[in-house]
Image: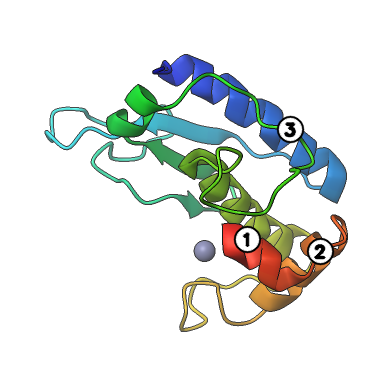
């Protein structure tokens, strides 16, 4: 076990390409980096402070920090797409996938539904979020509650 950040970056990009194609999104750069708590890690390639461990969607790029502990634990395995299981505690849903899909739901909310606003009182999870989940879930013929369960 254990995976290098370059390997996980490749796997995340392959998954992202699938999601972009399925949902007709305009692809954004993915800011995938290893979290560095020391304060000496500087910034990522996209200017994110590497102490930041919180994934996030922005109109220009998607921030996907990786914890070293997770990289030590994971294997370099591409999960099946579309997923065959919707249980976030299964091997099919490592944290990187959950994080990526969550941020892609915001991207869908922004780019397709045009209803994304981080200042909506719930960090973009108020207006447009339920509609985004419902639209995405319908492409996998599952309910949005099932999709929310892995995000
Ligand atoms: Zn969110």
- Left or right, residue 49 beside residue 133: left
Circle 2 — which element? loop
In the rendered structure, the answer to whether residue 12 lies left or right of residue 146 reads left
Q: Does residue 29 appear left or right of residue 74 in this picture?
A: right
Label 1, on which residue?
Answer: 106
Q: Is mark 1 within 8 Å of ligand 1?
A: yes
Q: Residue drawn at (55%, 49%), measured in percent from left and top?
A: 98
Which is more foreground, mark 1 or mark 3?
A: 3
Residue 106: percent from left, percent from top? 63, 60
Seen at 44% across and 49% down, the residue is: 55
Earlier along the polypeptide chain: callout 2 or callout 1?
Answer: 1
- Residue corresponding to mark 2: 142
Q: Do the residues bearing badges 2 and 1 touch, measured as CB atoms within 8 Å?
A: no
- How far apart, in angstroms, are the residues tagged by discs 1 and 3? 22 Å
Circle on res. 80:
3
Q: Position of residue 91 (x, y in %)?
A: 55, 38
User: Mark 1, residues whose alpha carbon is within 10 Å: few (<14), some, or many (≥20)?
Assistant: many
- Per the model, the C-alpha gap separating discs 2 and 1 is 19 Å
Quadrant where the C terminus is found in the figure: bottom right
């Amino acid at each position: 076990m254990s995976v290098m950040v370059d390997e996980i970056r490749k796997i995340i990009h392959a998954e992202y390409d699938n999601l972009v194609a399925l949902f007709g999104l305009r692809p954004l750069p993915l800011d995938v980096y290893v979290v560095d708590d020391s304060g000496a890690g500087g910034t990522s390639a996209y200017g994110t402070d590497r102490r930041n461990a919180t994934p996030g969607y922005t109109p220009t790029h998607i921030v996907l920090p990786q914890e070293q502990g997770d990289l030590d634990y994971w294997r370099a395995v591409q999960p099946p797409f579309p997923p065959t299981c919707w249980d976030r505690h299964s091997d099919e849903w490592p944290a990187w996938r959950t994080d990526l899909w969550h941020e892609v739901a915001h991207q869908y909310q922004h780019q397709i539904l045009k209803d994304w606003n981080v200042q909506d009182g719930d960090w973009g999870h108020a207006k447009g979020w339920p509609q985004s989940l419902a639209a995405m879930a319908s492409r996998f013929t599952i309910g949005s509650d099932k999709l929310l369960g892995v995000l």
